Amino acid sequence: SQTIHQWPATLVQPVGSPLSLECTVEGTSNPNLYWYRQAAGRGLQLLFYSVGIGQISSEVPQNLSASRPQDRQFILSSKKLLLSDSGFYLCAWESYRGTEAFFGQGTRLTVV
Amino acid sequence: GQQVMQIPQYQHVQEGEDFTTYCNSSTTLSNIQWYKQRPGGHPVFLIQLVKSGEVKKQKRLTFQFGEAKKNSSLHITATQTTDVGTYFCGQGGSEKLVFGKGTKLTVNP
């Protein structure tokens, strides 16, 4: 069966520090991969999505970047965090047919 | 780009009352997906609708896809405290998966 792993679950980082969040998927191949951010009590903002290795689409200009070095690995990064980067970050995958998406447990990031 | 608008943003009901959330798009949707996010949790897939006018039921939940495939609704009959959470509609399929802002449901026991 397919599973998605996202870590860490919580993270407190100082302003100006780098960030690396990793997401891996098991049990499937060639998934579409997504990074979303959810501010407290708000909706799911699509940050990045990828349909294949090295293929990244950015949805909003921001202080973040994403990479997909392997088929089932998706990484969210920042060189220097801002206070406004705080939020709940969710990784998700869906099959290339797009029938349903599966979310990781999420990372709650607090920038202080 | 493709956008789905969802209303209401918040809904508070007494246990036993019905609840409905609506999802609207200015363009035709290839499909509509519904997810539920419990407080502190991650979104979990509920259902996908693909056909014009489609209606699907899951126990007390009824999902509808409009005839023009531009709107959808989720209706919960006789809400229970276990229904609390945020309900999201999303456009997926061959397009990137984007969501409405969600409807946060609270239920007063």
Image: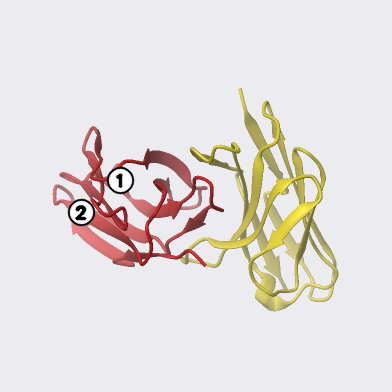
Residue at 53% of width from left, 52% of height from top? B97
Which chain contains the residue that carries disc 2?
B
Residue B100 position, x and y percent, is: 42, 61
Image hue for chain B: red
Residue at 14% of width from left, 47% of height from top? B16
Element type where label 2 sits in the image: strand
In terms of sequence position, does the residue under pointer 2 or pointer 1 come before the other?
A: 2
Which chain contains the residue that carries disc 1?
B
> Does residue A55 appear to the left or right of B53 in the view shown?
right
Image quarter (top left, top right, bottom left or bottom right) of the N terminus of chain A: top right
Contact flag, marks 2 and 1 (Cβ < 8 Å): yes
> Does residue A60 appear to the left or right of B28 in the view shown?
right
Distance Cα–Cα, label 2 vs label 1 = 10 Å
Residue at 30% of width from left, 65% of height from top? B7
Would you call the spot at circle 1 few (<14 residues within 10 Å), some (14-19), or many (20 or more)?
A: some
- Name the residue beneath numbered marker 1: B83
> Does residue B5 appear to the left or right of A53 in the view shown?
left
Residue at 45% of width from left, 65% of height from top? B3
Element type where label 1 sits in the image: helix
Q: Give B23 or A78, whichever is nearer the viewer.
A: B23
Q: Is residue A61 above or below residue B63?
A: below
- Name the residue beneath numbered marker 2: B19
Residue B85 position, x and y percent, is: 37, 52
Residue B84 position, x and y percent, is: 33, 50
Image quarter (top left, top right, bottom left or bottom right) of the C terminus of chain A: bottom right
Q: Give B52 or A37, whichever is nearer the viewer.
A: B52
Image hue for chain A: yellow
